[in-house]
Image: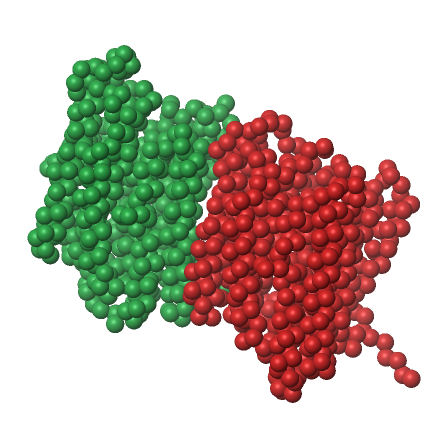
Chain colours: A green, B red
């Protein structure tokens, strides 16, 4: 289907333009204007993304809404955009999360409001650019550019140790991406001067260079996902980031890594992917089991959720490298669902943190007595995080475990331990924070959630339940694309 | 005897420049202390006049004159235009700084113009002697500029170091040239290439000469291990002079490498390639690692220059027009970023206060969000983060390196630039994450305000639309080879 209107460009640039407009509102005397402008921009950004879904053709796996213009011809780089069943849901997820983040920082952020709101809008546009790029250099530019706003968000509005976390975040991600750049330049030579990702998919490469390319991509994407053992930046970044930053980090930025595997690693280096699949599965299972155990021991709520993110993303990479339809679709569902659930979990911690300025589990207890509505929402998201049937968290995990059984019983067995560990660390934290006697005078003085917070959590709660009961719209979109991807991967390039 | 006068037209801008330098000196002599701006304006007029002359005589034809000692080709014209623009921007940026410090005198301007003339001669030289004369004119003017504040101990010390080491490097260069002359019997760049090609010369002597020439070049480029002068000179010089040393002469150095190594000794590429690989890797390593330890911003930027020069040398390694044009693109990008960065440092200086330490950037985003943003763009560009121009410069060079088959070198280069990213991030951290130590507002003159904003914006805009500069670089190289 061809669509003349440059919809994808609009989805990318509208938030960025709004972000710049928000920056120009200047200092904090115009804070209210900055907030409303940011909200308008983010909601508009979501609304214009809806045609992407309604006009999407689910019967084909080719790229849709394609735009292709010359960007700079010196290196044959094009402004080439398009989406398929893999990238489209992720763009929607991003556009959906952005207004929530703006609202989440509404009253909480009191300093440099325009810069805070503007940074989130710009980042939203950049991330859409990453998902929509079909040109490797365009992809790379968006990919790296997304580091800049996040770096500032963590560093300016973060917690006490924010500088360390921000620089660690930046350098860690930069390390991986620079090697990816070399791989892209290598592919440019190998393909006789093309930076088109689709050309790379067709490119026949011998096994040894394929393995090197795979490893270069792996470093870039594994850091982002993050996979064990390069996950150590994530807990630091999460703990120090402001609530909005944590939400975007968990819900959106981690997905960039997962997306990279599907767009680059698997189709460009399919033989290397098969060759190294066991290693990837092993790394993923370590993330699921070992990181799950680490999460159990955390005293800091944000750290706990950060580790649980690593474990859940381990499920995603596990699903990818099982290399069958259920596995990849399950992993995709898991990515989307993790976007909602982890975002909601961080919002819940944010609600508590805004009141007590503590993230330590030990400082809480008996919150349910003072905040019953909040406790109910938190319960739902905690259950979803643990993978309770009926929530979206269950669907992805179940699909991945199903597909793991087909490949190897022990893979499935180890993966399934997440249902136990996940429940253990989430519910144990929940119990210590919410139930019991009122722990301190500070908890005694807690106010239940405001209308603003209620709206936020309610929207997420509906989404989590909706996809838990009826995930079909999601799987329908990605089905053909995933099938094609698998057919492509199983067709050796050697 | 029949004397045929040479064709002066290809050197018209140099001749104009020389006349105008004398005019500036005389005008300043008569203008008196209250009208120092006369010299400033005349200098800007001179640069503009030169730009017009160069632009009017622009053609893709390669013209030799002065009996083959001088050449006017596309690359020379484009490099010269870049030099004029850069010098002019340097003057705008440093005007307030030097007038606060009593340096707004005719000497400053005439020395700058003499140095510019030296660069022009270097860029257009096609004979070893011309090249050497241009280089010395540039160097001697720079030594004097560094020592312009003769009552400052650090400046005098820097000038002495610069002079002694510079003289040594010139000696190296001359010795290498004499070896080459001994082996081939010519000093003409174009004849040299033919003689080397015909293999009528002694290869051993040539290679020995080449080693000395490369050493001399490395000194002028401040590539490791010949970089020792750079940190001291950058730190000791008045910031306006540091800005000048760090910017325009890089174009001349690029021209110098092109004339000597590529045009003159292009046949010996397999010999100098290996040397450049070592120099490049060492420069990137030394520059990036040593920069981390610096607390003086000028010293830090000196090490950053060293690492950028290493990256620049990578562009020559592939030894084809693709590589040379990416190196040229890198120089342009680098000079653009350096101009903005030093302009920011001068903006932070007030009369009686030198912004020397990186801590002077603390809390800049509170004091002035706009300049903090400009500096953010510049730092990210220096670190090579897209969508800033610095990324495309690195990208173009890496592409040339991978194309030449040196994938390991590209990997080493990106790892060093990862290390480099740290100290640029540190400046951003100081500006955005830390509280200001002073709340004194920044009040630049409106010309600085406009130019600096344009400069910072260009770093971003040329990053989003890099085609024009990339195309220009390729055009310059292809039409001159």
Image-quadrant location for residue B64: bottom right
Question: Does residue B341 appear left or right of residue A273 in this picture?
Answer: right
Image-quadrant location for residue A446: top left
Task: Find residue B388 and report its horizontal and vertical position in percent.
Answer: 50, 50
Task: Find residue B83 and report its horizontal and vertical position in percent.
Answer: 69, 57
Task: Find residue A379 and report its horizontal and vertical position in percent.
Answer: 17, 27
- Relative vertical location of residue A365 with respect to residue A151 in this rendering, above or below: above
Quadrant holding the C terminus of chain A: bottom left
Residue at 50% x, 31% y: name it: B434
Residue at 29% x, 14% y: name it: A442
Residue at 34% x, 37% y: name it: A236
Q: Can residue B277 be seen in the rendering of this structure?
A: yes
Residue at 50% x, 64% y: name it: A74
Given residues B251 and A421, the one toward you in this image is: A421
Given residues B167 and B458, the one toward you in this image is: B167
Task: Find residue A3 and report its horizontal and vertical position in percent.
Answer: 32, 53
């Amino acid at each position: 289907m061809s669509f003349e209107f440059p919809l994808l460009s609009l989805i990318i640039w509208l938030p960025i333009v709004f972000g710049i407009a928000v920056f120009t509102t200047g200092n904090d005397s115009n804070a209210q204007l900055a907030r409303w402008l940011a909200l308008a921009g983010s909601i508009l950004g979501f609304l214009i993304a809806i045609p992407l879904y309604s006009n999407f053709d689910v019967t084909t796996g080719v790229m849709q809404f394609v735009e292709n213009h010359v960007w700079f011809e010196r290196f044959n780089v094009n402004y080439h955009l398009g989406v398929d069943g893999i990238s489209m849901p992720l763009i929607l997820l991003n556009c959906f999360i952005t207004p929530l983040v703006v609202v989440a920082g509404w009253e909480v952020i009191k300093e440099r409001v325009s810069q805070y709101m503007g940074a989130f809008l710009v980042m939203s546009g950049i991330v859409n650019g990453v998902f929509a790029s079909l040109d490797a250099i365009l992809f790379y530019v968006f990919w790296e550019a997304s580091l800049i706003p996040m770096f500032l968000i963590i560093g300016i509005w973060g917690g006490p140790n924010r500088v360390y976390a921000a620089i660690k975040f930046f350098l860690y991600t930069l390390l991986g991406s620079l090697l990816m750049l070399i791989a892209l330049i290598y592919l440019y030579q190998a393909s006789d001067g093309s930076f088109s990702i689709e050309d790379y998919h067709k490119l026949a490469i011998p096994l040894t260079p394929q393995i090197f390319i795979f490893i270069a991509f792996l470093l870039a994407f594994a850091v982002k996902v993050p996979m064990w053992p390069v996950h150590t930046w994530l807990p630091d970044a999460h703990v120090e980031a402001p609530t909005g930053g944590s939400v975007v980090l968990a819900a959106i930025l981690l997905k960039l890594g997962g997306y990279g595997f599907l767009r680059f690693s698997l189709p460009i280096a399919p033989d290397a992917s098969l060759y190294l699949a066991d290693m990837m599965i092993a790394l993923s299972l370590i993330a699921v089991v070992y990181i799950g155990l680490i999460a159990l021991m955390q005293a800091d709520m944000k750290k706990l959720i950060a580790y649980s993110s690593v474990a859940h993303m381990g499920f995603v990479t596990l699903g990818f490298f099982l290399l069958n339809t259920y596995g990849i679709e399950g992993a995709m569902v898991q990515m989307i669902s993790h976007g909602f659930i982890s975002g909601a979990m961080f919002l819940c911690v944010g609600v508590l943190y805004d009141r007590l300025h503590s993230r330590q589990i030990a400082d809480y207890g008996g919150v349910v007595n003072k905040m019953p509505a909040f406790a109910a929402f938190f319960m739902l998201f905690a259950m979803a995080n643990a993978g309770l049937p009926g929530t979206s968290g269950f669907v992805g995990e179940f699909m991945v475990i199903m597909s793991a059984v087909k490949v190897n019983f022990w893979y499935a067995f180890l993966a399934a331990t997440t249902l136990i560990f996940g429940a253990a660390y989430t519910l144990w934290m929940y119990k210590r924070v919410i139930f019991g006697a009122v722990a301190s005078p500070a908890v005694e003085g807690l106010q239940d959630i405001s209308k603003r917070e209620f709206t936020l959590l309610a929207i997420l709660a509906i989404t989590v339940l909706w996809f838990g009961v009826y995930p079909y719209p999601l799987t329908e979109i990605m089905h053909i694309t995933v099938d094609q991807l698998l057919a492509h991967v199983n067709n050796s390039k050697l | 005897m029949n004397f045929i006068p040479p064709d002066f037209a290809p050197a018209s801008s140099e001749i104009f420049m020389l006349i105008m330098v004398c005019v500036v000196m005389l005008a300043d002599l008569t203008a008196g202390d209250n009208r120092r701006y006369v010299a400033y304006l005349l200098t800007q007029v001179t640069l503009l006049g030169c730009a017009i002359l160069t632009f009017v005589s622009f053609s893709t034809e390669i013209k030799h004159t002065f009996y083959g000692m001088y050449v006017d080709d596309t690359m020379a014209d484009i490099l010269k235009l870049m030099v004029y623009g850069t010098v002019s921007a340097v003057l705008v940026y440093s005007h307030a700084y030097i007038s606060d410090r009593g340096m707004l005198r005719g000497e400053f301007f005439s020395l700058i113009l003499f140095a510019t003339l030296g660069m022009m001669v270097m860029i257009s030289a096609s004979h070893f002697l011309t090249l050497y004369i241009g280089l010395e004119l540039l160097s001697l003017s720079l030594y004097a500029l560094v020592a312009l504040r003769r009552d400052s101990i650090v400046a005098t010390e820097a000038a002495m170091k610069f002079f002694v080491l510079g003289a040594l490097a010139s000696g190296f260069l001359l010795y290498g040239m004499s070896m080459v002359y001994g082996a081939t019997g010519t000093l003409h760049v174009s004849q040299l290439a033919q003689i080397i090609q015909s293999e009528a010369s002694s290869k051993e002597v040539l290679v020995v000469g080449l080693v000395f020439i490369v050493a001399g070049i490395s000194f002028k480029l401040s590539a490791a291990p010949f970089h020792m002068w750079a940190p001291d000179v950058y730190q000791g010089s008045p910031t306006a002079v540091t800005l000048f040393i760090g910017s325009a002469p890089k174009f001349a150095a690029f021209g110098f490498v092109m004339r000597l190594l590529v045009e003159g000794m292009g046949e010996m590429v397999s010999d100098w390639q290996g040397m450049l690989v070592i120099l490049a890797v060492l420069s990137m390593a030394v520059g990036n690692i040593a920069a981390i330890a610096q607390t003086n911003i000028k010293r830090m930027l000196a090490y950053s220059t060293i690492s950028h020069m290493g990256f620049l040398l990578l562009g020559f390694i592939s030894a084809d027009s693709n590589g040379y044009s990416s190196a040229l693109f890198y120089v342009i990008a680098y000079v653009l970023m350096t101009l903005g960065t030093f302009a920011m440092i001068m903006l932070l200086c007030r009369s009686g206060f030198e912004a020397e330490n990186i801590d002077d950037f603390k809390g800049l985003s509170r004091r002035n969000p706009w300049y903090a943003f400009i500096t953010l763009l510049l730092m990210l560009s220096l670190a090579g983060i897209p969508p800033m121009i610095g990324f495309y410069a690195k990208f173009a060079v890496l592409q040339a390196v991978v194309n030449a088959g040196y994938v390991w070198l590209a990997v080493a280069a990106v790892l060093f630039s990862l290390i480099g990213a740290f100290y640029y991030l540190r400046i951003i951290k100081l500006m955005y994450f830390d509280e200001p130590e002073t709340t004194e507002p920044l009040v630049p003159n409106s010309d600085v305000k406009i130019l600096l904003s344009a400069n910072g914006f260009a770093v971003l805009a040329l990053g989003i639309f890099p085609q024009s500069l990339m195309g220009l670089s390729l055009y310059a190289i292809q039409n001159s080879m």
